[in-house]
Structure formats: C-alpha cells, structure tokens
Amino acid sequence: MSDPQHWSGLDSRRRQPSPSPLKAAFRGGSTGGLALTSTGALAGAAVESRPGTAVDQQLSRKALAVHRLILVAWLVVSDALALALAFRIAYSIRFEVQLTVAPEVVAPKGTYDLLTSLLIPLWLTVFTLFDLYEPRSKLGGSLESSRTLNACTVTTMLVIVATFLVPDFVISRVWLVSVWLASFLLVAANRFVARRVVYMIRRRGYLLTPAVIVGTNPEAASLAAFLADRQSSGVRTVGFIHAGNGDPRSVGDVTVLGSISEIGSIVRERGIEDVIVAITGIGRDELLSLCEDLDSLPVRLRLFTINLAITSSSAVASIPALPAESVAEAAT
C-alpha cells in the first residue's frame, strides 16, 4: 500500500497555485504592459525588478556611456558631411548655375572652400548649444527638427552679423541663403534617418535611460503606460517609488523599489538618471524631501501632471528636467 503521507504531499503540491504570468515576468526581469483596473489599481507595469549585482550595474552604466558616445560621434560626423554637402550645393547654385542678380561677380578661387572649412565647426558648435548632441534629448521628429531649424538660423545670422562687423568680409547673399536652407534640409534628413536607427536600437534594449516613477497612484500608472513604449520614450522604467502612508510592497503586482526616504540609495545602486514625479501622487513635504535628497545627485528631476494632456510616450519623454533646488524653492 502506498504511503498516505506521500500522496498527501503530492496533493498539496498539486493544489499550490501557480504564479501569475506578471509575477513570473517580474521575477525573470522581463517587462509587461501596464493597465488600470476598474478600481484604479495598478495591474502591471513595464519595470525591471531584479537589481543585479553592483558589478552588473557598473558594467551596465559603462555600456550605456559607450553607446551614447558612439551615437554622438556618429551624429557629429554625419552632420558634418551633411553640412559639407549643403555648402557645396549652395556654391553650385550661386556660381555654377549662377542663380543671382549679379552674374558678373566671380568668387576668388578657394575663398568659399576656406569659408566652408571655417563655418562647419561653427555650425556644429551651435548644434551643441541647442542640445542636438544630447542623446537623452532625441525626443521626436518635430522637436528635433525645430531645434535644427533654429540652430541653422542662428548660425546664419551670426555670419550676417560678421559681414557688418568686418567690412572686408564680403560673401554672396544668394550663397548664404542657399546654405541656410540646404543645411536645414540635409541635417533634418540626416536626423530623420538617425531617429529610425535609434528607435531600432531602443527596441533591442539599448540606449535607454534608467528611470524611476515617484508615486503609485493612477496618474503614476498612466505615466508608466506611456513610458512602456521604449522606442519613442527612450526610458527604461526600473520601478516605482512609494509616497505617502501604507505598505510600499502591496500595490498589486507592480515592483515598488522603496519609499522616498530611500531615493538616494536607490538612485546610486541602480544607476538611475531620471526621476519622474507624478504630482498627484506625492505631498508637498515629500516633494521637498525628495528635492533635498536629489540635489547632490546626478539625476534629472521631471514633474508630471495629468493636466499636461500627454498623448504619447515621446511627449512624456519631452517633459523638461528641472533642477531639484528650483523645484524645492517653488514648493516652499
């Protein structure tokens, strides 16, 4: 006869409920979609649950830094090539096609080649001032294109100002206008291709900014749902930071990394770069405490409210970063 204890042991194991797919996903470090239940509770999130070892975190940060450096180098080189082509097209329009009101004016040989070699670095410098080489600022086509147009316009105006300040510095106005238009179109086209490549890389889990969301209320859930589209947002949501009273580990199946009082250690241990605050999920005193803790850390603080009428993940990513000190002063 079989041992009753043996059968009871099998029966007890058979009756044990299997873990939900969401819990299994969190245990495995994978991601899932985020949705709100009818009661407004959090049902899932695109988060990363396992912190890994300190060595793993350090290697991950170094890899992200190397990937960003490669991206910036690629953008600088491709922009320089686009600008060189723009200057060549402008020269052809003015002096080969002779689209001008003064066709008898001929440029001295080599003058515009030298001018091109001097102006391309100026263009790239202005691009840098407009944050066109900040990897975390690749937010979307319209924003990046507007920055490109503004940068090209400012650089063209600088050249015009130089022609007034230096009387001997005389250049063709048709050439300059052609440079302005061609530089914007070609650099914008280059950035369009670059965005598609970056989106493809992000889908594979690279070039993602590690971030935490402060708050566990429905607004924080909506924010996480938008950020779950990593391709557009460029954000990897590591988890949530609990604010207010209650058990920080009992918000459905969503990973809560800790409370606001632990934000400093969480940022350092997990290499967090963005701290995104759901305004309705945090009190005034907690916001002040958060700002004090983040003031000395190399992170970007961004405030999110449903009043911003966010409609896409790229729009969430475009929420401006605010210095923690400024936020603290505004809250006092």
Image: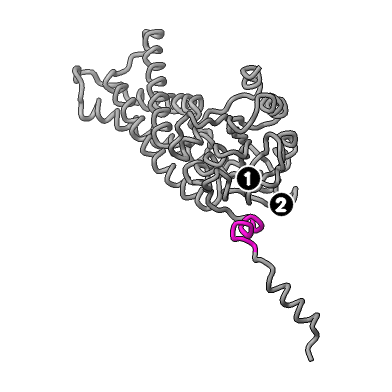
Q: Is residue 40 above or below residue 128?
A: below
**Secondary structure at numbered mark 1:** strand
**Secondary structure at numbered mark 2:** loop
Kindly identify which numbered label has been placed on residue 60.
none
Residue 91 located left or right of residue 101 = right
Residue 282 falls inside the magenta stretch:
no
Identify the residue shown where x is 43% and y is 35%: 79
According to the image, label 2 marks what residue? 52
According to the image, label 1 marks what residue? 238
Colour scheme used in the picture? one colour
Q: Is the magenta stretch mostly helix, strand or loop?
A: helix
Foreground: 141 or 187?
A: 141
Closer to the N terminus: mark 1 or mark 2?
2
Identify the residue shown where x is 60% and y is 57%: 22
Identify the residue shown where x is 72% and y is 29%: 293
Image coords of residue 97 (percent x, y): 20, 29
Q: Which amino acid does label 2 sit on?
A: Gly
Q: Image quadrant of residue 92?
A: top left
Residue 20 falls inside the magenta stretch:
yes
Image coords of residue 247 (percent x, y): 72, 43
